[in-house]
Amino acid sequence: MSILNEKGNLTLALVLVLISILSAMTLALFVYADTANLTRNMEYMQEKFLMRSEIERGFKVLERNLDIANSMILPTRRIIITGSHYARTYDTTSKIEAVTIGDSKNSQPDRYSIIGFARSRGKNHNSPVHVSQLTRESRYTTAEVIRLSLAGFHDFNDIGLTTNDTSTRYWGGDVIRGRVHSNSNINIEAGGNNEYNGIWPCFFSKVTTAGVFQWPDGMGTADLIFRGGYEEEVQPIELPTIAMDVRQFGHNIYTGNGPSSTIFVVEVTGSTWNAMVGNVQFTGIDSMWHYTVDPGGYIVIDSTVYNIRTIKDTIWTSGGGGSIVGSAGMVYNAKLWIRGSFGGLQTWACEDTIFLIGDIKLAGTNLGEIPVESPANMTDCVGIVSEKNIEVKYGYCDPFQSPNGAGFYPRVRPNCEDGGIYIYASLCALGDGEGNPNYDGVFTIEYQHPHRSTPDAVLPYLNASGNVVDTLMTMLDLHGFHNTGVAGWVNDDTFIPLGTPGNNSWPGNLDYPFYNPLWPELLPYRERGNIYLWGSVIQRRRGYTHRSDSSNPNRAQNCWDFDNENVGIPQYGSLVTSQNLPHSPSAVSTTGEGYIKVFRYDERLDTIIPPCFPRSNRLIFVDFNKLSTQNAYHQNDD
């Protein structure tokens, strides 16, 4: 019995030992499995970080190589990570692919795909690193990147100053829904009022500056002001000086004889355009004899005193027509006047100044409606690009209408009398004054400082025969005032071109001859209505669209010198000798001269852009935070 008992105890002991061994092995397997899972998770997270770093590397390379036409694969990086019980080698690289690159036929932003790859090699524990061993999986992740067209900025200023070198601002009157960028400091001021943020401006998209934000009235609540985010001291966004893509891919619409002597006037109807060409011709020199009023009340000529002026005549001829739908057109060596209803994708560009002589409408959108709202207009998109300035024209003689019996074309002011002007377009003024602010590109208005002048009139006139006859007397101001820059009346046979800078003799309360394009005009408009814009404004400096007397310290000098913006004194001040100047029937404001801005970003510009519109050097990720890591993407084991 004792022997049997001893055998039973031995058997039991062996069973217990076996159970212990099996338990230890099971526990070891669990520990190994947990360790393996932890290692795999660590590898996955490490690969994810490495793939994202490759996305960033590809992004930085793309920023410096925006002309990639097809694809580029970056050199492979080998990253070795070792520890006391861990060793792993990672091979990473990234590939840049050009998905959509803009050209003369393209209406989408440049779009790129950046693919970040990561593959791990090697063994765990303390074994040496074996770079030839490939894991079961290689991984990649993809980010979509677009190159912003400048049309995608609702408000872009290269230099955050006016042409007077005064600072610009955003204040409580500003509610801006599109992107904003300045390569200079941005002033945020309190004042005015809006429904979203009271006296402070409100931005619904991201605001960036290569400078800093300045707060003259103390800092407001940034989260309420910048609802789309903001960033200071970013890399400047280059604003080109010429419309390179239009020049390279677009049509040469017309080449004139010089911007001072050629006007190319375009009227667009849907997909087609028609043009008139105005050739400004020098026809001679005129002696403007001094008129005096005899005590009898009739006009007498004093032939001993006179002004000298050049005589110019604009001869209008047909400029042809055509279509640039899906592309762009360039006008060289001339000024461009343009208006119309635009169908399809069109960009109009000019080497010199562009004047908007009427509404810039979309064929598929009723005037006053928002093009992105139902039904959305995704077919019509317009770009206006000037290598100088873009100006809203005050008035002009319309060559598309029939001349009267004397051969004169009707004088019209559609931008003053029809509610203002509607602009469905992206505007870009590229002018570079090379240090002279007066020649930097701006979006602005023509005839900013209106004054009265004496219109043509039928007056009693003492002719050479000694008879008093009723006669049409023209350019009465030039016959009544001298323009030599010398005080008093003098004989002068020297040719004096009108508009000579520094000429202080012309009366400050009288309109300077030909400054008003409809001169002479007794009562020109001050306030002219609204500028309704659906689109974007890109300019070298901030142009004036509204003026007030207090904004111009030179007005008190009572003289005319356009280079220094000496533009006489206010016509509705103490020296007014006739009734005050009127406001347009369309005017909303009565506080100055010009237009009230009603600007709204066109959200369609996030997906379609005008052909050949200037592009920026700014790249942005498309849904970068939604990047997903894909498994089992196998490449060759090279």
Image (tube, rainbow, N blue to C red):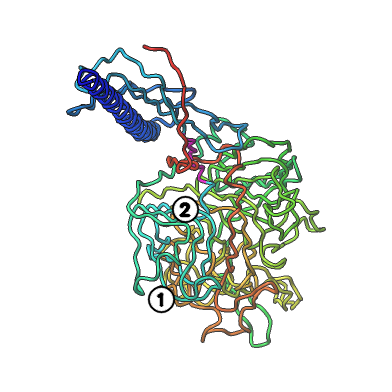
Tag 2: amino acid: Phe
Point out which mark residue 90 bears: none
The segment highlighted magenta reads 143-150
The local crowd at label 2, few if under 14, some if 14 to 19, many if 20 or more residues have their Cα within 10 Å, is many
Tag 1: amino acid: Gln
| Residue 241, visible in the rendered structure | no
Q: Tell me: residue 635, above or below residue 420.
A: above
Image quadrant of residue 58?
top left
For this rendering, which residue is in front, 96 or 337? 96
Q: Tell me: residue 350, above or below residue 312.
A: above
Please report the residue visible at 56 percent of the width from the left and 50 percent of the height from the top.
427
Q: Tell me: residue 533, above or below residue 255.
A: below
Q: How many marks?
A: 2
Point out which mark residue 156 bears: 2
Q: Is residue 101 left or right of residue 374?
A: left
| Residue 9, visible in the rendered structure | yes
Image quadrant of residue 43?
top left
Q: Looking at the rendering, in which quadrant would you find the N terminus?
A: top left
Q: Looking at the rendering, in which quadrant would you find the C terminus?
A: top left
Q: Which residue is mark 1?
A: 557
Q: Tell me: residue 231, above or below residue 299.
A: above
Question: x and y percent of residue 83 in the render?
Answer: 19, 29
Please report the residue visible at 48 percent of the width from the left and 47 percent of the height from the top.
430
Mark 2 or 1, nearer chain start:
2
